[in-house]
Amino acid sequence: MADSHDSAWLKYGRAAHLHSLLMRRRIPLVAGTVYGRLTVISEVPPKNNGKFERRVRCRCICGTEIITSFRRLRSGECKSCGCLNRELITTLGRGSREFPATTQELWERIRAKCVWIGDCFVWQGKAKHPRSGHGRLTVRKGKTRYVHQIAYEYVHGPVPAGMELDHVKSRGCRFGACCNVAHLEVVTHVENVLRGNGWAGRNARKTHCIHGHPLWGSNLTIRKRGSRECRQCTRDQARARRLKKAIRDAV
């Protein structure tokens, strides 16, 4: 019985104790206080989620009433009912950090951070993919895009659905962060992978197995999943297993 009482205190008593500490230090809330475009009307009961977060009913200067947390009001995170964001889009345009910029505006930002290295127009920004080296640009808060995709869209329009852009080495492209549209080609995902330097691309370009047997004609077997298999190596492995089993049975 004592154990159940202790566990109940740990579950509910601790939360009530923390709530009492918060109540002692709570900042007085005065009706009529203005935070940005919001005017405090009254305090509303907190949600029943165990967080004990103070919630406030406010009226915006446009006449809309909303309910938000007191913490967001005091920190400046919540300044209006949403009318401020709509006005910023109208007055400042879509080029601010909070809102997505147009393709032309993004291309101007990319061009300012690129240099010519041979025939490649290479992105010099810090944000690059750790493996592929593709350059990335922050188009709005919390959203990044590849710079070579933006460059292609600026010249040719959006990439078709289900397709990707490949940096074609045969055209002289030597950098993953290259933004030269002449070095880009629209391909499928499978073709892009097979052209790359990953294990799938390297194996697809092999003409002989590790033992030197040719991977074509009658010596080639295609598995159900599409991988290739050397028949001579398969026969040699089966022969070695039979020999090993015969030696083990003879002993």
Image (cartoon, rainbow, N blue to C red):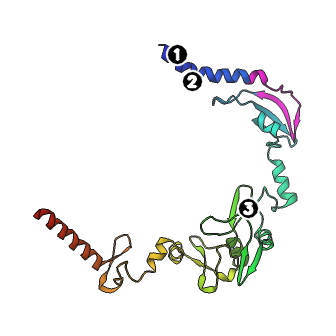
| Residue sitting at the far left | 250
Q: Is residue 59 magenta?
A: no
Q: Residue at x 82, y 35 (%)?
A: 58
Q: Residue at x 53, y 72 (%)?
A: 189
Q: Quadrant of residue 27?
A: top right
In magenta, the rendered stretch is 22-43
Q: Secondary structure at mark 1?
A: helix
Q: Is residue 55 above or below residue 5?
A: below
Q: Which mark is residue 138?
A: 3
Disc 3 crowd rating (10 Å Cα; few below 14, some 14-19, many 20+) is some
Residue 36 x, y percent position in the rendering: 87, 41
Residue occupied by mark 2: 11
Q: Quadrant of residue 38?
A: top right
Q: Mark 2: which amino acid? A: Lys
Q: Which mark is residue 144?
A: none
Residue 154 x, y percent position in the rendering: 73, 75
Residue 24 relative to residue 2: left or right: right
Residue occupied by mark 1: 5
**Mark 2 near mark 1, Cβ–Cβ under 8 Å?**
no
Residue 13 x, y percent position in the rendering: 61, 19
| Residue sitting at the far front | 251
Q: Mark 1: which amino acid? A: His
